[in-house]
Amino acid sequence: MKRVVLASYARGNPRPSDFRVEDVPVPEAGEREILLRTLWIAVDPLIRFSLDENLLSGATRMEPGSLMVGPTVSQVVASNHPEYAPGDFVEGRSGWAEYNVLAPDEADYRGPPRKLDPSLAPVSTALGALGGPGQTAYEGIVNVGRVKAGETVVISAAGGAVGSIAGQIAKVLGARAVGIAGGEAKCRALLDLGFDAAVDYKAPDFADRLKTALPEGADVYLDNVGGDVTLAVLPLLKRGARMPMCGFIAYYGMGMEGPGPDRLPGFYRQIMAKGLEIRGFAGIFAGQKGLNDIAGWMKEGRLRFPEAIVEGIEAAPEAFSSVFSGHDHVGKLLVRIAPEA
Ligand SMILES: NC(=O)c1ccc[n+]([C@@H]2O[C@H](COP(=O)([O-])OP(=O)(O)OC[C@H]3O[C@@H](n4cnc5c(N)ncnc54)[C@H](OP(=O)(O)O)[C@@H]3O)[C@@H](O)[C@H]2O)c1
């Protein structure tokens, strides 16, 4: 089988050459272990935290030669564990490999692989709307953002998995949703999804366009990005605005200090003067309630979830790198490793 390992620590944004595809034997399941055939890999931005030589947060450490690990959907091929049977579909964290062996009893805080019912939804949605990104969007908009009907919500990385769901949840709640994304095509796709306005942050007059899209300012800013995008949003936040801080992908390759200039003084000024409420959060807090609400809205046709698919395990390094360097996909970017049996 094939698998992807880290070839060298990432510096700045990850590049395909940071990874290597290897041929290795298919592993065998031991006692109370399961053998999984990987169907889908999600190239999630947070995996980047594991690729630094000096870890800056509690992320799993990956060293050169280590198997890449992240969210996957797989099918059980062989089971020595009473709770899993061949044919079961599961979602969890496993290697970027065509086959993986997992020990469900040794699961970390995220719990053992979650069994999926393919009759309820395509199993790939367990990595998107009905998985971590869906929970994260729900937590950011409903629980942390406390978005209400009539409010205006602005969302960065709105074309991504989290942002594209977040904007639609804001619409379900009766708010006005403004998305920020890279490129005109992505912005058009956001309007198709029901966003009220979409602004291209790569346009030279981005700040002016954003002002036009937010004539009365914004009540809530779901931030996935940080960086220059957030600097352009801050002056447009209303007094007392809420800012659920979901991610800061613009800084993921930067370590603890950017190259400057130091913009913290201006940031502090705005937090105090406007009484901004900024709260970081983890999406898993939304739990099953978030997933149930999203599933209901999908069933009612009120929430759509586009997926972009690239084929084959060799495509994973390029797909992961493109999350940082930019790509034209909207929704969840997935790597299909094998067809569902
Ligand atoms: N708090 C949590 O529990 C949690 C859970 C999941 C994800 N997250 C975070 O939420 C954010 C979005 O995740 P996702 O799953 O939606 O990711 P995704 O689907 O991979 O989308 C990420 C998008 O971010 C944009 N981007 C990348 N670098 C950028 C930059 N320097 N400036 C502006 N935009 C940039 C790109 O879109 P464009 O083409 O538009 O630039 C990219 O497609 C990430 O920061 C992620 O780490 C947090």
Image (cartoon, grey):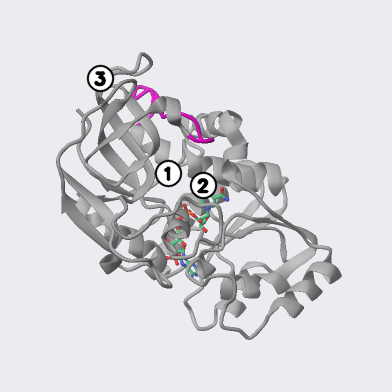
Report if the CB atoms under discs 2 and 1 are less than 8 Å apart.
Answer: yes
Magenta stretch, residue numbers: 108-122
Q: Label 3: state its secondary structure.
A: loop
Query: To which residue does mark 2 refer?
Result: 165
Q: Position of residue 242 (x, y in %)?
A: 74, 56
- Nearest to the observer: residue 51 or residue 225: 51
Report the quarter where the C terminus lies: top left
User: How many numbered callouts?
Assistant: 3
Q: Is residue 115 magenta?
A: yes
Residue 277 shown left or right of residue 53 in the figure = right
Query: To which residue does mark 1 refer?
Result: 305
Q: Amino acid at mark 1?
A: Phe
- Nearest to the observer: residue 262 or residue 181: 262
Q: Which mark is in front, 3 or 1?
A: 3
Q: Residue furthest bottom?
A: 261
Report if the CB atoms under discs 3 and 1 are less than 8 Å apart.
Answer: no
Q: Which mark is in front, 2 or 3?
A: 3
Query: To which residue does mark 3 refer?
Result: 86
CA separation in Å, label 3 and label 1: 29 Å
| Image position of 197 with respect to 66: above or below | below
Q: Residues within 10 Å of mark 2 (few under 14, many from 20)?
A: many
| Image position of 267 with respect to 306: above or below | below
Q: Amino acid at mark 3?
A: Pro
Residue 251 shown left or right of residue 121 in the figure = right
| Image position of 155 with respect to 202: above or below | above
Q: Position of residue 202 (x, y in %)?
A: 47, 76
Query: Which quadrant of the structure image shows residue 16?
Result: bottom left
Residue 277 shown left or right of residue 227 in the figure = right
Report if the CB atoms under discs 2 and 3 are less than 8 Å apart.
Answer: no
Which residue does the image show at 17% across and 53% down from the upper left?
A: 22
Q: Residues within 10 Å of mark 1 (few under 14, many from 20)?
A: some
| Main SS, magenta residues | loop
